[in-house]
Image (cartoon, rainbow, N blue to C red):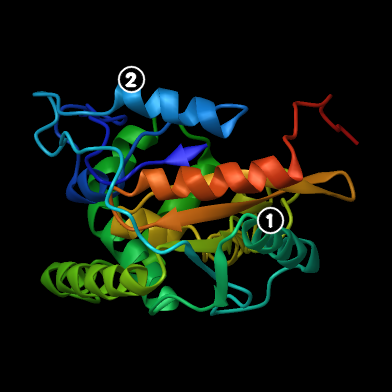
Amino acid sequence: SLKTSFGRFPSAGTMPPADTPTLAFQLMGVEGPMARHVADLRLGVEVMAGRHPRDPKSVTVPFDGPPVARRAAVLTEVPGGPIHPAVADGVAKAAGALEAAGWEIVEATPPEMEQCQEVWARMLSCDMPATVGAAAEIMSDDALGLLNELIDRFSPDDVPAILIHTEYHRLGAAWAGFFAENPVLITPVWTQLPFAHDADVGEGGMDLMLDLMRCITPVNLLGIPACAVPVGVSDGIPQGVQVIADRYREDLCLEGAADIEDALGNITPIDPVTA
């Protein structure tokens, strides 16, 4: 799957009122294609990308950017906590695949990942009180409780919204500088293995989700692209990595993901495991 850059795809919104999304959804709510092969993701982007008058933030941007060094930074330790050994092994497999394809591999950590997650949560929390009412019509009580816990933990009253958005800009500039040196970044998707059903809405669910998403929330916050690509199976559980690049460099995400897919193969759908 491909999570696209801010504005790459037009969106009319997904929660009521769909034509007037809140600021957090305007900045972080994006669309992207899913496919069984990386090459098909590019086809999807070519069809769906571009300016649409119903979404004033959407833009028409060339898909292929200027040439860059074939250098990939690999995140082997995630700030804020450990990662599961199987997840770390998947990242190592992806790095090996890229190195075999001619990429220069460096171990590097992008700037202030924990601060990115803090700003992500606070930006959502600023807008969430205005959307909880609509969400209550379609969400379970447990899931709604998770949203309310987010609001309580990252109270909009704690930090002025103007400071949150200035941090958003500062962090975006810091990551852009990182990508100027390392055009592609390889990270886990989730930091741990998939959780048991409903663990995310039970006791400790907020801590679980924030831990799992340490590599996802910065990408969401900053409006940068990421391609999730399979790297194999561990104890019956599919494993994958993210191939991340600077804003509007989906071409680099897909180039790296294609090299990983060529080396490690493609995982096809299987019968669900129910017990």
Residue 268 falls in which quadrant of the image?
top right
Q: Which residue is mark 2?
A: 47
Label 2 environment density (alpha carbons within 10 Å; few <14, some 14–19, many ≥20) = few
Q: Residue at x 44, y 76 (%)?
A: 114
**In this rendering, which labeled residue sits more in front, label 1 or label 2?**
1
Nearer-the-camera pick, 221 or 32:
32
Instruction: Locate residue 146, reporting x and y percent.
Output: 49, 52
Residue visible at 45% across and 48% down in the picture: 253
Q: Residue at horizontal 60%, vertical 29%?
A: 37
| Residue count near mark 1 (Cα–Cα under 10 Å), binned few <14, some 14–19, many ≥20 | many
Q: Quadrant of the C terminus?
A: top right
The residue sitting at the top extreme is 47
Q: Amino acid at mark 1?
A: Ala
Given residues 250 and 162, the one toward you in this image is 250
| Residue 17 visible, this orientation | yes
Q: Which element carries disc 1, helix, strand or loop?
A: helix
Spatial distance from mark 1 to mark 2, Cα to Cα?
A: 29 Å
Name the residue that disc number 1 marks. Answer: 97
Q: Residue at x 84, y 24 (%)?
A: 271
Q: Amino acid at mark 2?
A: Val
Q: Could you say where residue 62 lies in the image, as x and y percent from the top left? A: 22, 38
